[in-house]
Each structure stands twice: as structure tokens, then as C-alpha cells.
Image (cartoon, rainbow, N blue to C red):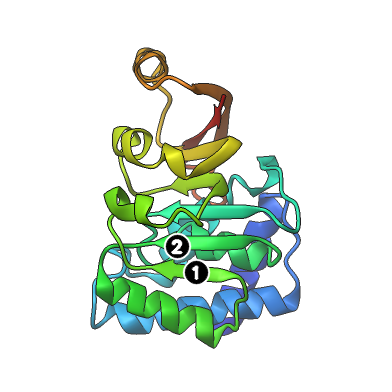
Amino acid sequence: MKDAAIRELFAQGGTKLGLDFSSFQIEQFVTYLSELVLWNKKINLTGIKEPREIIIKNFLDSLTPLPYLKQTPQSSWIDIGTGAGFPGLALKIANPTLHFTLVEPVQKKTAFLHHITGLLDLQNVTVINELIENMTNYPQQKADLLLTRALSVKIVLSQAKDLLRSEGQILFYQSRYENKLWDQLILEYSGLKIDQIIPVKLPFSQDPRVLILLRKA
């Protein structure tokens, strides 16, 4: 894809999600994509290879919850198992005031995260090269919102919910909502309740997704 087409795809995708990106933000997304494609030739950052598919299935998919989430200039969010920065870095670019912690156990991927946050001069971003079960060693990393696209629900609920502040939320990106499964999970992991179940569709592809937002009681 030519750069002009990439910029237009980001702009149109944002509009379809109800997000109005500045030209500066679009340039940040373009740079991020370019570096991701370049690094992906050497290390496995994403299994998706085509730029258009990366934009839709990684960037825009990451951004789907933004219109539904409460944000303040001091909001602190943690992305567990962020990989190449999805959803965390995409959300950070879309909302620069957020304070983000990106947790990723694979060192090569955290090297990319350090590179891209430095290249884009993103402020208030912390990259932690760590397994989720070791995050209790970082008591300062208490968050208003914990989110993940990569890890299983049970792993997050059993090992990461203590990273939340009182009344904090957990966001899961899911392909569908299963009533019985979630009823069972809420019974199993006390102190949590389902806050919102939000069906969404990816821009352009119209692939269905479900955003499941829990709240720490």
C-alpha cells in the first residue's frame, strides 16, 4: 500500500469508530506500522503480514473500546501480554494523556516496544519485560483499567486482578459472549461483576467482536 492510502485507511477507520485523529496522530500510526512491518521480517511480532490487514485487525481492533471507556488525564491503564503493543500503544496514540504500562514476557518484543515508544516520543509509557504472575513484584503499577487481547480470561482473573485499584475495571477483547461461561467465572472469582457487554464490528471487514468490561467490587 502507498502511504497516502495507509493514511486514508487510518483516518476512515477512526471515523467509523467515532474517533477523530489529528494529522500528527495519523503520522504516528503510519510510523508505527512501518516499523512493525520492518521488525516483523526479523522477529515474529504479528502473524498478519499485509499492511491493510494489520491496520484493521491490529490497530483498529485495538481501538474499538475507546468510545466506551471512562478516561481522565491521569487514567492509568495496564496492557497484559501486549506483544507488539496491541492494544496498549494504539490506545496511547489515540489518547495521549493516558498513562500506560505495557507488560510483555518476550524480550525481543519488549525491545521493539522500547524502540517504538522512543521513536514516537510517547510520554508516560512504562514497558515491563515480565510474566504476569510476577507482576505482584510491581506494587506501584496499580491501574484504573487492566486490558488484554492475548491472554486467557482465567489467567488474567486469577493472576492480575490485584493490579487494579479499588473500583478498577478489566477489559477483555473476545470473539463472542458465552453466558454460561461468564456466569461461572463471576461465581468463581469473587469481587468482580460484569459492567458492560459491548458488541462491536471491525471497520471495513465488519468482523464481529465483543468487549467485556468487568468491575472490581
Q: Is residue 144 left or right of residue 54?
A: right
Identified by mark 1, the residue type is Thr
Residue under the point 66% across and 58% down: 14
Asked if 149 appears above or below 140 in the picture, the reply is above
Q: Position of residue 74 (x, y in %)?
A: 71, 57
* First along the sequence among labels 2 and 1: 2
Q: Position of residue 179 (x, y in %)?
A: 41, 15
SS at circle 1: strand
The residue at which mark 2 appears reads as 102
- Which class describes the residues within 10 Å of circle 2: few (<14), some (14-19), or many (20+)? many
Q: Is residue 129 left or right of residue 140?
A: left
Q: Are marks 2 and 1 in contact (CB under 8 Å)?
A: yes
Identified by mark 2, the residue type is Leu
Spatial CA distance of label 2 from label 1 is 6 Å
Q: Which mark is drawn over residue 126?
A: 1
Residue under the point 66% across and 42% down: 69
